[in-house]
Amino acid sequence: MGEILLEARGLSKGFPGVWEHLILDHLDFDVRAGEVHTLLGENGAGKTVIANILSGYYDKTEGEVLIRGNPVNLTSPRDGLAHGIAMVHQELMLVPAFTVAQNVMVGLKAPALSFGLAQVERRLDELVVRYGLQVDPRARVEDLSAGEQQRVEILKVLFHEPQVLLLDEPTSLLTPGEADQLFVVLRAMADEGKGIVFISHKMREVFAVSDRVTVLKLGKMQGTCHISETTEDELTRRTFGETVPDYMERPAVSSDAPAIEVRELVPKGLGSKAPATGMSFRLRRGEILGLAGVAGNGQTELIEAITGLVPPSGGEVWILGEDLTGKTPRAFIEKGVAHIPERRREIGIVEQMFVAENVALKDYRKTPFSKKTVMNQSEITTHAQKIVERFNALVPDLWQTECRILSGGNIQRLILGRETWRKPPVIIASHPTEGLDAKAIRHTWELFLELREQGSGILLVSEDLDEIMSLSDRIGVIFEGAIVGIVEGRGADRELLGHWMAGTTSEAA
Amino acid sequence: MELAHFWGILFISLHAMVPITLAAIGETIEESAGLFNIGLEGILLLGALAGALGAQASGSAIIGLMTGITIGAAVGLIFGVISTTLRGSQLISGVGINLFALGFVALMLTVMGAPGFHSVARDVQVPLIHLGVGSLSPLVIVTVILAVAVWWLLRRTQLGIWIRAVGENPAAADVAGLRVNALRLGAAIAAGAFAGLAGAYLSVDWFGAVTKEITAGRGFIALAIVVFSGLNPLLALLGGFIFGFFDGLATWVATYPGVKDIIPWQFVAMAPYIVTLAVVAGVIGRVKFPKALGVPYMRE
């Protein structure tokens, strides 16, 4: 293994106004030439923050960053690039209306009135061949798939010939097949003598690509080791504290009462993705139906249709045996449909409203929270207090804290509490545990199983196959606006689901 | 219709094209960068007053135009600071500029002793270029050159890529090392300067006078033309000419003996505005605007 390219000593970071703990607590970390060094940790462990500091995007609170042994103080991402440090962010940082080459040009340090588009395109052609990154430099980014856009992100930073490349969960938008292709590229880059920092929370990927792995938990180091010296179980224990079961055992619930029944449903907004026939499936009460799929395959549109947010353009939605097609969101709520949305800050809460108001958002017009249109603040306070305590949300004050200042995890706890305390007969949950720590994930899963036993029908939409496989009684896969298939949850074949998610049904079957 | 009428209408059209087009291409730069300044009308008005005063004080039309540009750029700077570092509402500050300009110009005209009207001496107006078939303001040519130059700047330079990136996805631009607010501020100043020049043209060149109604909604029409053009300065030039043509036609109809008796001039005077409305209603929704238009950017 080569020389140390980039090193952090005693790195600390605390965001102002954040309680609990330091985001990063005196961390030591290094990456060497020719290696893929994985940063492993669950959401909120601080992986992204390290990468952002090392690349110059965030300031550090304490500690030292050294490049080839020389202390540096990076003040901006451009400064980082000048020092040979490049970062690929988790969210795509692209201009959709630009071509691939134009996106690369955004980061060029060229004279203002020059125009090197043709040269940039030629350079990109070379890079595409050199690393096997299949993407057309002249294509418009908005016309590319998520996997291709991810490759554009990588091309963008490779253009600067960085020595160290930090990739923050680059596989989160990719199908398993695309992820494998990416690993080949990462390996090629490492073999050229670059240092690669790969951030992930998926165990499979860690073993597929890493030379070394560093485990991070709530901002603290849990040790670094060579991949050959460790096992999946050991890493899982260090990351999550306990092993994730493949399938959580649960008692049988014998109910045939329908929770959701969807017939030939064509949600609005699918655009060119809309398949010839609509979606049909049935969710019983006392059942968890997992819906897996890569983001952007119609999950959002499906949920909008079955919560009443956007009336479908075809087909029917039956809730608890009643046809609610085209009814208002309120009709769905009154019928007992709880919705835990993916875009929690946008549609899960009202960011500018206080915690207590947000907790009462779906109940304020019912007794005892209001009488004859006048709200009863003390009832709401008592209720909100109960929810906050029950779900361990960290909230400074019920009536003075605006929800926008809370972390994503805490917002999610409030939403989970608000949506489930009535034990609703139908629950539609999209990425319910994203951004929660291991304990909270565990609690959420147990809560879902408990609600299931009490007769809730739960539609669980998630990209996290582990979560889907642990929780679901049945598992469906959505691809390009269609339900590809539904299988039993116990003993489900991960590979088959992966193929379905990638749209390679014929090969798998 | 005689050939002379054709030339007459064409020349009026070209002169009417100038202020709208100048304001529109400046605003194109600004909207490309993600800012939306509804205060163009106000800047035009302030530019008209500043241009007239500058020309008279210095005795030079060029200095008058420069004064208009400077005042426009200054207002653009204020708007830019409010919209970037202060993260204020662009709508409100734009409306504020319009209201301020209306009140301020009316007040100044009164202070200057001629409520509602102030004429600019002929010898400090921009001299016309005399062609065989009519007289043309040099600013017509300047406008065409500027439209092409701004098109080139936005579509064929590195700076254009940066400006548009900041408007489409400021976070991506930031990560790429661009100074988002600095670029936006620059675009706001440029838009102000263009609108200031357009205003000064009205008083120092075209009309040779300042009234408090001199802009006659041209700032808003410029905004409409930006929509019509889909942020393409060359189309903005075309849009400006179309409006100018109807403006010119209206003037011709209103003054031509025989015609003015048949068609009431009030109807004809509406034509440019109705055409603008129709054109914009036709294209709106089909044109793609920067994703981050009107949204202030903050990092963490």
Image (cartoon, rainbow, N blue to C red):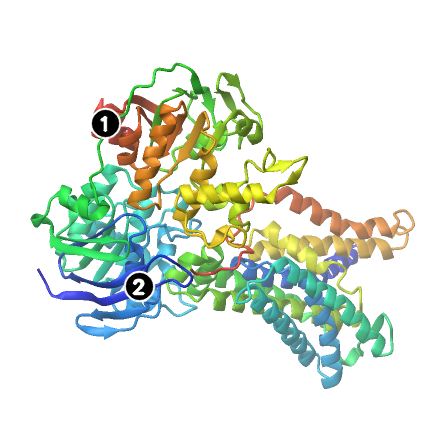
Q: Earlier in the sequence, mark 2 or mark 1?
A: 2
Where's residue B156, x and y in %?
A: 45, 60
- Which of the 4 quarters of the picture holds residue B112? bottom right
In the displayed structure image, the side of residue B192 where residue A417 appears, left or right: left
Q: Residue at x 43, y 31 (%)?
A: A428
Where's residue A245, x and y in %?
A: 22, 34
Residue A153 shows in the view: yes
Of circles 2 and 1, the one toward us is: 2
**Foreground: A397 or A302?**
A397
Q: Tag 1: residue type?
A: Leu
Q: Tag 2: residue type?
A: Ile
**Foreground: A97 or A487?**
A487
Q: Residue at x 12, y 54 (%)?
A: A225
Q: Which residue is mark 2?
A: A53
Mark linked to residue A496: 1
**Foreground: A222 or A228?**
A222
Q: Residue at x 21, y 57 (%)?
A: A221
In the displayed structure image, the side of residue A83 where residue A416 appears, left or right: right
**On screen, residue B86 above or below B56:** above
In the displayed structure image, the side of residue A364 where residue B254 appears, left or right: right
Same subunit, tags 2 and 1: yes
Are there few (<14), some (14-19), or many (20+) residues within 10 Å of tag 2?
Answer: many
Residue A480 shows in the view: no
Element type at mark 1: helix
| Disc 2 to disc 1: CB gap under 8 Å | no
- Which of the 4 quarters of the picture holds residue B42? bottom right
Element type at mark 2: helix
Q: CA distance from mark 2 to mark 1?
A: 39 Å
